[in-house]
Amino acid sequence: MEKLIITAAICGAEVTKEQNPAVPYTVEELVREAKSAVDAGAAIVHVHVREDDGTPTQSKERFKVCMDAIKAACPDVILIPSTGGAVGMTAEERLQPTELFPEMATLDCGTCNFGDDVFENTMPMMREFGKRMIENNIKPEYECFEMGHLDTVLAMAKKGQVPGAPMQFNFVLGVPGCTPATVQNLCWLVNGIPAGSTWTATGIGRHAFTLAAAAIAMGGNVRVGFEDNLYLSRGVLAKSNGELVEKVVRIAKELGREIATPAEARQILGLTK
């Protein structure tokens, strides 16, 4: 098996300090959490940004400040800024980080329920996102929250509406209202991706580490972090994103998977720095 790429989703747009005091808002806190994750073994940091009071934002200026600061502390790390933003943001608002020409960025693959909210990703929006990433030479990480999202984005790739092979998928399972986080569902999704693709599994909440273990055993990659899960184990809040990454590293070692460095991750993902 190839080495395991670990992604740390360090803050997301929804979780708060009231839920876990270690959730980062400020630039300094984002750097602290990114470095804790990278030092523990993460090759990728998935970046959402907040204002200092915790308000989610897609401001290009805020992303630049935060990403530059993370890069100063972790020079080799792969940064994947979010184009998902927060529920209710416009497409143009969400697309701002692509103006910074990152190596990669997320591309959400369809509308879905997000708890009591609706996360809107219409076909016209997705075509707009795909066009921007083609123009800016950004490799998407295709975020699939539902089974049908995979077929949707594969059809778009065949039409040249989004970047094609080699494709990187992130299967986000267990969001309330979306596809449940079961190994059966993960296997179905993995079996549907084109040859030569890479994939990551993200389990939400209590599913974080059970889905991680399955992905590790199947030869895939893993995402963990405060965006997806605030707990190290049942009832035990994680003190940092690094603690969550460390747990994945321990599981991987037990299952015989080595951990990829950022340089090795770039090679596996087909990136050039």
Image (cartoon, rainbow, N blue to C red):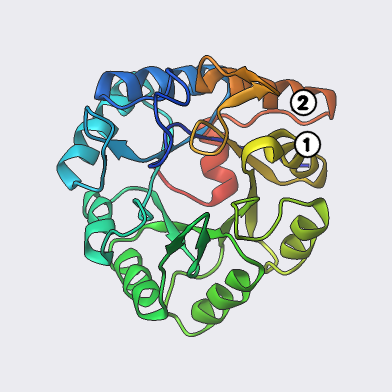
Pointer 1 local density, CA inside 10 Å: few below 14, some 14–19, many at least 20: many
For the C terminus, the quadrant is top left
Residue tagged 2: 251
Mark 2: few/some/many CA within 10 Å (<14, 14-19, 20+) = some
Image position of 154 with respect to 98: above or below: below
Of residue 188 and residue 90, the one placed in the foreground of this image is 90
Q: Residue furthest left?
A: 61
- Please tell me in which quadrant of the rendered image residue 215 appears: top right
> Which residue shows up at 34% across the image and 25% down it?
30
Residue 265's tag is none
Helix, strand or loop for disc 2: helix
Is there CB contact under 8 Å for labels 1 and 2? yes
Nearest the viewer among 130 and 261 is 130
**Res 88 seen here:** yes
The answer to whether 161 is drawn above or below residue 47 in the figure is below
Q: Residue 249: image x %, image y %?
A: 69, 23
| Residue at image location 35% in from the left, 40% down from the top | 48
Instruction: For residue 4, say whether it is visible.
Output: no
- The image position of residue 122, as x and y in percent, is 40, 76
Q: Which residue lies furthest to the bottom in this view?
A: 159
Residues 256 and 25: in front is 25
Query: Circle 1 sits on which residue?
Result: 213
Q: Distance between the residues labelled 1 and 2?
A: 7 Å
Q: Where is residue 240 in the image (x, y as percent from the top left)?
A: 50, 18
- The mark tally for this picture is 2
Which amino acid type corresponds to the residue marked 1 in the rendered image?
Ala
Residue pushed farthest top?
239
Sequence-first disc among 1 and 2: 1
Q: What element carries label 1?
A: helix
Q: Residue at x 66, y 62 (%)?
A: 196
Residue 12 place in picture, x, y as percent: 42, 39
Residue 159, placed above or below residue 43? below
